[in-house]
Image (spheres, helix red, strand yellow):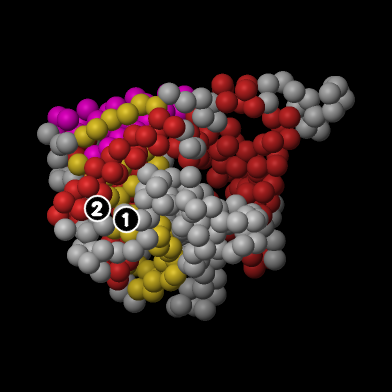
Amino acid sequence: MPEVIPDDSVGLVTPQQFHSDVPLTLRSGRVLPEYDLVYETYGELNADRSNAVLICHALSGDHHAAGYHSMDEAKPGWWDNAIGPGKPFDSQRFFIVSLNNLGGCSGSTGPVSHNPETGKLYGPDFPIVAVRDWVASQAQLADHLGIQQWAAVVGGSLGGMQVIRWAIQHPERLRHAVVIASASKLSAQNIAFNEVARQAIAKDPDFHDGNYLEHNTIPKVGLTQARMLGHLTYLSDDAMRQKFGRELQEGKLNYSFAPEFQVESYLHYQGEKFSTRFDANTYMLMTKALDYFDPAGDYDHDLVKCLSHASCDFLVVSFTTDWRFAPERSEEIVSALIEADKNVSYACIDSDGGHDAFLLPITRYHQVLDAYMNRIANELEGRS
């Protein structure tokens, strides 16, 4: 709980809700007759509505990217170190929009919502959504806000995939794309990690084929295991060695199968915490969206042909120790953009933070973001 809200914070924020009665046909062929999106905004929209920036979240993210919901909130939003006055995404210069995607569990329509056609919770009957479906719903939100073109669409990891999809699906609706720690498609290894996580959830006796809420329970063990596995892949070997090494909880071996090393206790803590706040069906949906993402598949699996449909400028950022979305994956995107004759800037940031580095206040990383966003802001001010 902050005693005083910092000067560089967006301060107290209140989530808002957008309701769409326009049916949304999904990639799967199923139709959502109506849906809600929860979102937050930071800063003010300028007179010609040209300074809007969309923040797209990753797998376990949501709309609460910056600031505080109340003075009782223990921590600010998940990207508070990058959003706010004087920060890379400067709320004094930009109107920043952050939302919870369809299928989420933080207020947007998803498995924990009521199906208007049955009056019951969607649960496992909520349709599988694809990245293109999120972008379609985000475009509806933009229309609602009166934003015809984003100054930039920004995202890390799964959020970066949404940025790529925005660039090819609605090329006229964004001027800049900021793709961070992402890839144009998942590797077989990444798909395998996601499947192991889903199986941990599905095999939990409390999962009940996704109908756990009807049984007044949650697949806590499965969710905990899934998060432990995921968290393991978000960190680098260096980060884990520096943070934990082989330190023991009690300073001695107990010769038991209970957690003894600090790294074990850390993973159990992260898994336990996650299992109490995140919906299992949503986790299943989000990981499937990751697996299915392959925009070049619509263009003869030619990434150059795919990205040639974009008309915006790009900033692509990767991190040296990110082995989940390695720099090589970002460099594939950069190479394709160059071959497609697009304007692209690229930075590979030296960090021991692994995949999670995109969430950290790394000085060089923030300098890169700040320089690029400052250029956009100066362009806007030059037009006014």
Q: Is residue 5 left or right of residue 266?
A: left
Q: Is residue 331 above or below residue 89?
A: above
Residue 183 is labelled as none
Q: Real-space Cα distance between discs 2 and 1? A: 9 Å
Question: Residue, x 41% and y 52% (percent of image)?
Answer: 85
**Which residue occupies 57% across, 26% down?**
239
Q: Please give the residue where the numbered disc 1 appears in the rendered image.
A: 94
Residue 126 seen from this side: no
Which SS class for mark 2? loop
Question: How many neighbours does mark 2 have within 10 angstroms: few (below 14), some (14-19), or many (20 or more)?
Answer: many
For residue 47, what is the image quadrant? bottom left
- Left-right relation of 47 to 19: left
Q: Which residues are magenta?
A: 314-340
Residue shown at the point (58%, 32%) measured from the top left = 232
Place of residue 250 in the rendered image (x, y in percent of width and height, measured from the top left): 84, 28
Image location of residue 17, percent across then percent down: 43, 71
**In the rendered image, which residue does mark 2 sit on?**
151
Classify the position of the C terminus by image quarter.
bottom left
x, y percent for residue 321: 47, 24
Q: The disc labelled 1 sits on which kind of residue?
A: Phe
In percent of width and height, residue 60 lies at: 51, 49
Label 1 CA crowd tier, 10 Å (few <14, some 14–19, many 20+): many
151 or 221: nearer the eye?
Answer: 151
Q: Are marks 2 and 1 in contact (CB under 8 Å)?
A: yes
| Nearer to us: label 2 or label 1 | 1
Is 320 a magenta residue? Answer: yes
- Please state the total of marks drawn on the protein image: 2
Vertical order, 104 against 261 (above or below): below
Q: Quadrant of residue 188?
A: top left
Q: Nearer the viewer, residue 75 or 316?
A: 75
Q: Which kind of residue does numbered mark 2 sit on? A: Ala
